Amino acid sequence: MDEITDYHIDQGWFDITRVGEWEGSKGGKPSIIKITQQDLKDMAADYSPKLQEAPIDTDHWGFGPALGWVSELRVAGDKLQAKLTKVSDQLREWLKSGAYRSRSVAMDMPHISTGRVYLTALSFLGAAPPAAKGLDPVPHLFHGGASNSFVWIEPAGEEQPPLSPFNNGEKESSEKKEETTMDEATITKSVTASVTDTLKSFFGSAEKTELSEKLKQAEARLSESESKTAELNTSLEAEKKRANEAEAKLAETQKAAELSEFKEKIEQAKKESRLTPAEGSGYTKLGERLDTEGRKAILEEVAERKDNGLLGEHSAPGQNIQLTGRMASERAALKRVIKMRGGEETEDDKHTAACYDLMEVPGNEKLSFSEASVRIRAQVAA
């Protein structure tokens, strides 16, 4: 059980110090060094090769090459344990042969960076006795690690029986093997129960319960936050929808107001005789199909029109022209049609009457209705 192999050196955890008051040295002078459980926790928690890597030597040389390095620290009960890395061939042979079985540590109390106790070096001792007593000479291979745990040895070659805490690789008789197997079963059961109790104790501890409760509280807060976020997103989408609807309604209202203003200006142009009734109707219908820019272009064109005076009256008495009367019958027929409709004169009726007036002007005896219509429209557009 006390044999050490490369597997132990590379994978095992070495006891390096423990809680207690020990005879050591401080500042090069003999002194009582007190190490507490909290000191062990601080060293294990703070240790980092990037901050300061602890070298390995023998008998506290403090000079020459390092024989290896400490890669990790952990607390196992009242002991501080270290895992090694880059162990030199020379130190490996010394450990395997048992030349160096004890350990001693160098610490900063406190360390300049952490302000707490910090491991700065690990020494393997030969003949010199260690300050801290009760450290296991064999590294621990159990995951949890404990000074009173069994030390598991790696399997031997195929021709050798597997090493275990019970036979150390010895060949046994069938009777002894049967007896030992019963012992193994009993001891294994006891070890399993011990490990199980330890795990239950750890996972059922107040600290674990507190962490679990905090995790549940954090999850509850996260769930509540996600719920509120969903509600806010829903409200935001509703606000966006209302804003879009309001914007669309405003645009529709503005369009209706602009179209109404357009129609009013067309009607005003008709009253001012700058448009014929037929032109006014055409522009109004066209404006309903165009956008704002199109209607604006129409109004700009209409604004340049001048009053031609042809649509104000059906006759032309203001011009002191004596009409010939050749279109009297047609004028009378038009009046009868207007009367039959209830006396309401349409825009086309006004245009037709204006054509009749032009045809009755002396000198226009040969002017046809279509020619008169063209001339009237040309004069209105001029």
Image (cartoon, rainbow, N blue to C red):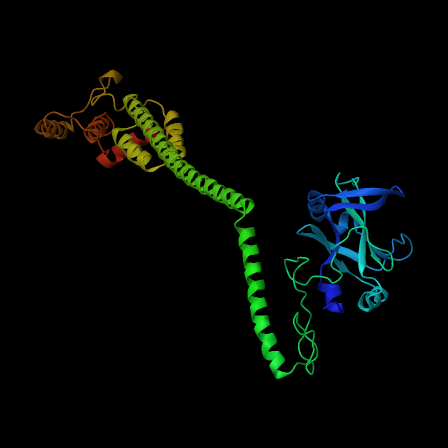
Q: Quadrant of the N terminus?
A: bottom right
Left or right of residue 9, residue 313 in this image: left
Q: Position of residue 134 (x, y in %)?
A: 74, 55
The part of the image, by quadrant, that contains residue 92 is bottom right
Along the line of sight, the residue nearer the viewer: 210 or 325:
210
Residue at position x 38%, y 25% from top? 303
Q: Position of residue 26 (x, y in %)?
A: 85, 42
Q: Residue lying furthest right in this view?
A: 64
The part of the image, by quadrant, that contains residue 156 is bottom right
Along the line of sight, the residue nearer the viewer: 69 or 164:
164
Report whether residue 53 is seen.
Answer: yes
Q: Is 89 rendered above or below residue 316? A: below
Count of numbered marks: 0
Q: Quadrant of the C terminus?
A: top left
Q: Position of residue 67 (x, y in %)?
A: 85, 60
Left or right of residue 122, residue 63 in this image: right
Q: Position of residue 2 (x, y in %)?
A: 74, 67
Left or right of residue 213, residue 129 in this image: right
Along the line of sight, the residue nearer the viewer: 143 or 351:
143
Report whether residue 379 is seen.
Answer: no
Residue at position x 84%, y 58% from top? 125
Left or right of residue 67, residue 263 in this image: left
